[in-house]
Image: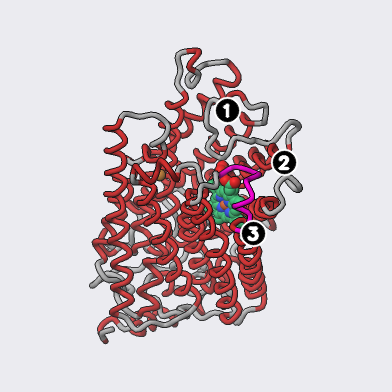
Amino acid sequence: MTKKNSPARHTSPMIKKRDSVPRGGFYREQGRYKGILAWLMSTDHKRIGIMYTLALLSFFAFAVCAGLLMRLSLIAPGKILNAQTYNEVFTIHGIIMIFLFVIPGIPVAFGNFFLPILIGARDVAFPRLNRLSWWLYLTGAVIILISLGLHGRPPDTGWTFYAPLSIESQANISVAVFGVIVLGFSSILTGLNFVTTIHRLRAPGMGWFRLPLFAWTLYATGWVQMLATPVLAITLVFIILGRFLGVGFFDPSKGGDPILYEHLFWIYSHPAVYIMLLPAMGIISEIIPVFSKERIFGYSAIALSALAIASVGSLVWGHHMFTSGMSDTARVVFSLITFIVAVPSGVKVFNWVATLYKGSIVIVTPLLYALSFILLFSIGGLTGLIIGALAPNLKLHGTYFIVAHFHYVMFGGAGFAILAGLHYWFPKVTGRMYAERRARIGWLVLFIGFNILYFTMFILGYHGMPRRYFDYPPQYFTGHLVSTIGSWITAAGLIIIFTNLVRSAFKGAKAPANPWQGRTLEWQIPSPPPAENFERLPVIRGDRYRFERKE
Ligand code: HEM
Ligand SMILES: [Cu+2]
């Protein structure tokens, strides 16, 4: 690292300001309402970010329990869950993990808390719209929970709601689907808000190519949220119309087509993978330079690859349907574009590794998560190429190979990035440090458990074990046993990680403003940040990631 951009130079002028803000930062500023209403009615992006984070983590915990239950049942098939209840449990697990945890995930939690701070703004462009997004998210979540507990059966179609099953099933499909539509509106409004915020509220001097990379990925994600989510909403409305009015969009006997459903569904749901992953890549791009003590290698390539992934990634949905019925031309083209979208992802991985290679690395928990993200996401991505190729896809489609692949991408990728962000930004959000040793132990246990749980599924899938089955021939037993043991280790890791975070939030040592010597704006204001973030808006001058304040 050169002297010119040594962190001390940028932090010192701000430290002085600490005394002038009330201790406890924004937590002390209740506004018009008191108690719980000070939270629920708040338009402060930081409060909204925290509420989302707590909600997301509760749903995550609930869905992890469903996952553990399935794993347990799979070592004693038929004894714990039968065919019907197994269908219900994997559907609940999938719906909650996807729609309530990993899709809203990083943007609503860390995006809300940090985007305005990172670009030098006091809040998002539309704070009240932001609160509406949060209320819609809560409403959607409650509707989905109602669909699980309502008289009648919880949804049993899988999180994909494939027709014709989703039209014919006797379960509470309409309620669940309606909940997902409401969540979709929440997502669209968040995307709209973030895109506008980045266009309009960047601090003076923060040109596009001085934007922190996390903000770049939220920008690309915002466009995907706005453009792709309406397609999902329409598709799910068609399901409801099919169930109540017998409108046969997807019913061949009425001139419809179930494959139409698959197209519409994946036109949204493949880009949704990037709604999960782009912001994850953004977090990793913030963490790696800080703990390599090195400016990020290839800034513009990383920034622009986010846009490339968002646009090219919107054209690959057909790879979910190679076995559904499509012309060979279509299959070849979808396969080709799938390979092309791997290129910008590879660019990012290359740049992260190059940054680490040039830097002097400090190993702390956020970096451990970032490093394991690179490994696990690469395994997820590269196995994506195996199933993106036509011939292996025909064999592996509908097997545990797919289950392993998407857990590596969504849990090993987005999930690990969330854990990276939780540790990295913990001092800023709570004003306290987490306990480092326990955090590392938790990481290690999770990392080991994760790989035992899911790598085994690649092997099971390669040998032909189909997904969404509660029972199987005896030759798969050993694989299932190993995977289930892995799920217990994973759960132990998660318990260590979260008990440590909760304890530290109340008992941890007080955090300084900039414990990691970060150079982005959030580290230049006190921990926790004051209401409205900045007393005076910062002016960004000189090189990217370097900033001084107007005096
Ligand atoms: C300890 C954590 C977890 C465990 C033990 C677990 C376990 C499982 C199991 C056993 C299945 C069903 C396999 C089958 O029969 O087809 C499954 C499916 C699934 N999991 Fe997980 N999982 C975990 C975490 C996650 C996370 C973090 C995500 C997403 C962020 C996720 C998303 C999904 C999805 C989307 C499905 C597909 C459901 C469907 O087929 O409709 N899981 N998981
Ligand atoms: Cu896809």
Say whether residue 183 is visible.
yes
Q: Label 1 vs label 3: CA separation? A: 31 Å
Q: Is residue 441 magenta?
A: no
Question: Residue 357, image x and y in percent?
Answer: 30, 78
- Magenta-colored span: 467-478
Above or below for 305 versus 157? below
How far across and down, in percent of the image, does residue 458 sit? 49, 55
Task: Give amino acid for label 2.
Answer: Asn
Within 8 Å of ligand 1, the CB of disc 1? no
Quick one: 448 or 210, which is closer to the camera? Answer: 448
Marks 1 and 2, Cα distance to the nearest angstrom? 19 Å
Q: Which residue is mark 3?
A: 481
Of 293 and 438, nearer the camera is 438
Mark 2 to mark 3 CA distance (whole Å)? 18 Å
The residue at label 3 has a CB less than 8 Å from ligand 1: no
Q: Residue at x 27, y 69 (%)?
A: 544
Mark 1 Cα shell of 10 Å, populated few (<14), some (14-19), many (≥20): some
Position of the N terminus, as image quadrant, is bottom left
Viewer-side label of 2, 3: 3
The residue under label 1 is 165
